[in-house]
Image: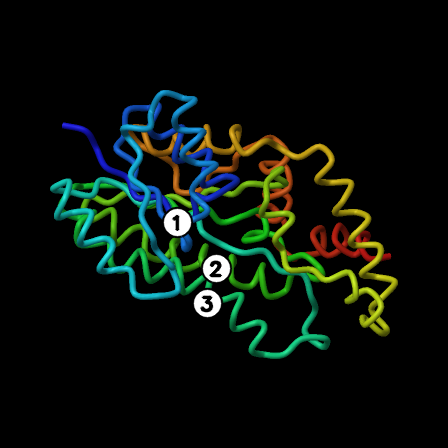
Amino acid sequence: MTNTVLVTGTSSGIGLATAVAAARAGWRVVATMRDTSRSGALVEAAKAAGVADLIDVRALDVTDAAATCVDDVVAEYGRLDAVINNAGAGHVGTLEQESIDDIRGVFEVNFFGVLNVTKAALPHLRAAQGRLITITSVGGVVGQPFNEAYCGAKFAVEGFMESLSPLAAAHGVRVTVVEPGAVASEFVANVGFDPAQLEAAGPYAPQLRSYLERTRNAFDGAQTSEDAAASIVDVLTAEKPAFRVQTSDAARTFSGTKLSDLDGSVVQSLTAGWVS
């Protein structure tokens, strides 16, 4: 029997590459996205990989209740063996220059969207003794200037999943968070940064300029979406996956900075250099 995995945010980037890679590994992939009119790139990639028959594209906005989509998948395929929470949105800004509603919107997609899908899927994952995989970020471990809202949401996801993991494991569900570093994907282009913000940043303009220059340099050597997807599929297929997985050596080094920094001084010194 073919195992079934639901992947969110598959119209581009890591989600698209993960859907194709999971299908190549023999999984039935329910590839979801908010707007299925954007499925062309995924469909073409699936055809090129010879796995179009294993990919089922469906509409799912993670900020809405996900139960209908999940229940329909189980009704059609008989079970749900894994979920990969990938959908998310980048964001650049700082608190003094933003509204609280702006920040709520970042949490709605990156945190509550994950919870919506997870809550709907958990009963079925328990029944299948399945996998719950959530794509977070090194930004879920190391707080970064001008990423307060995004990192805050990813920190929340990591804390939530770390807390949920032992309880889920007691019922046969393995929980993993996957932390990419810089990945060359449309996610970078979709962070919602308006260049006009640089002019409107007031006292923070010099720091924002420095941050943007550092970030451009970081993404020059970014990992490909396909490389990141390979790490995710390794988690999907591993007999005993770890709770926390990074997708590259750079991500391991960066996350390790925080995880061994008991008083926070190393991280503060590192990120201060980004805005000076």
Q: Which mark is residue 250?
A: none
- Tell me the quadrant of the picture where the C terminus can be found: bottom right
Q: Residues within 10 Å of mark 1 (few under 14, many from 20)?
A: some
Q: Which residue is mark 3?
A: 108
Q: Which residue is mark 1?
A: 36
At label 1, the amino acid type is Thr
User: Residue sitting at 58 percent across and 73 percent down?
Assistant: 102
Q: Are marks 3 and 2 in contact (CB under 8 Å)?
A: yes
Label 3 SS: helix
Front residue of 207 and 186: 186
Q: Residues within 10 Å of mark 2 (few under 14, many from 20)?
A: many
The image quarter containing residue 172 is: top left
Q: Is residue 64 above or below residue 249?
A: below
User: Residue sitting at 72 percent across and 75 percent down?
Assistant: 97
Q: Which residue is mark 2?
A: 110
Nearest-to-viewer mark from 1 and 2: 1
Front residue of 153 and 175: 153
At label 2, the amino acid type is Asn
The image quarter containing residue 27 is: top left
Which of the two discs, 1 and 2, labels the residue nearer the N terminus?
1
Cα–Cα gap, marks 3 and 2: 6 Å
On screen, residue 189 versus residue 37, left or right, reads right
